[in-house]
Image (tube, rainbow, N blue to C red):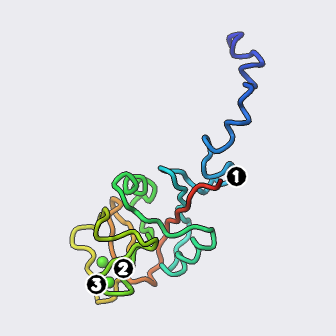
Amino acid sequence: MSPARTSSAARHPPDFPLLLLSPVFPCGPKSREWEYFDGKCYYFSLTRMSWYKAKAQCEEMRSQLAVINSYAKQNFVMFRTRNERFWIGLTDQNSEGEWEWIDGTDYKSTFTFWKEGEPNNSENREDCAHVWFSGEWNDVYCTYECYYICEKPPPN
Ligand SMILES: [Ca+2]
Ligand SMILES: [Ca+2]
């Protein structure tokens, strides 16, 4: 090892404690399950449940089901869901065919990434949306058991 590498200044740079704060771990240094992307923190569940339970689970963690409102976010999600089904915060259960984002984001003027032929409201009972193969979206019945994605702002 070079002398520079072993100097005490190199091992203990004076600003080291500061680096542990938000710039390096914006979702919190003790929150390994929350992943940072573009101003928000995301949780990818390891268990499957209905859309309703997933929604409640996110709320219990002071978050909400994810709202995918850009291609960049879609891309981020796609690489972490690995072709598995994950619920997102999109539903048409209030009015058939009228899709609504859980946070009030306007559906009609916002990015979508439906699989071709979806949403198809199969058997007239598919009112909740999940990501699937290649991250594309599909509607399925809301009691289906999926993994889920929660999102929240970074802690202060
Ligand atoms: Ca529907
Ligand atoms: Ca469908």
View quadrant of ligand 1: bottom left
Which label lies toward us, 3 or 1? 1
Split into 4 quadrants, where in the image is the N terminus? top right
Asked if the residues shown at circle 3 and circle 2 are in contact, with their CB atoms under 8 angstroms apart, the answer is yes
**Within 8 Å of ligand 2, the CB of disc 2?**
yes
State the image coordinates of residue 143 (x, y, percent, origin top left).
Answer: 46, 84
Residue at 38% across, 74% down: 129
Q: Label 2: how many residues lie within 10 Å, few (<14), some (14-19) or many (20+)?
A: many
Expressed as whole percent of the image width and height from the top left, the position of residue 35 reads 55, 53
Comparing labels 1 and 2, the label whose residue is closer to the camera: 1
The correct choice, above or below, for 36 with respect to 59 in the image is above
Q: Secondary structure at mark 2?
A: strand
Query: Within the image, what quadrant is residue 16 found in?
Result: top right
Residue at the location (44% across, 68% down)?
Answer: 86
Disc sitting over residue 46 in the figure: none
The kind of residue on which mark 1 rests is Lys
Residue under label 3, please give it: 122
Q: Farthest residue in the top direction? A: 3
User: Up-down: is 125 above or below 83?
Assistant: below
What residue is shown with label 1? 30
Q: Alpha-carbon distance for marks 3 and 1?
A: 42 Å
Whether residue 33 sits left or right of residue 14 in the image: it is left
Q: Residue furthest toward the bottom?
A: 124
Distance from the alpha carbon under mark 1 to that under mark 2: 35 Å
| Nearer-N-terminus badge (3/2) | 3
Q: Where is residue 67 shown, x and y percent of the image?
A: 43, 65
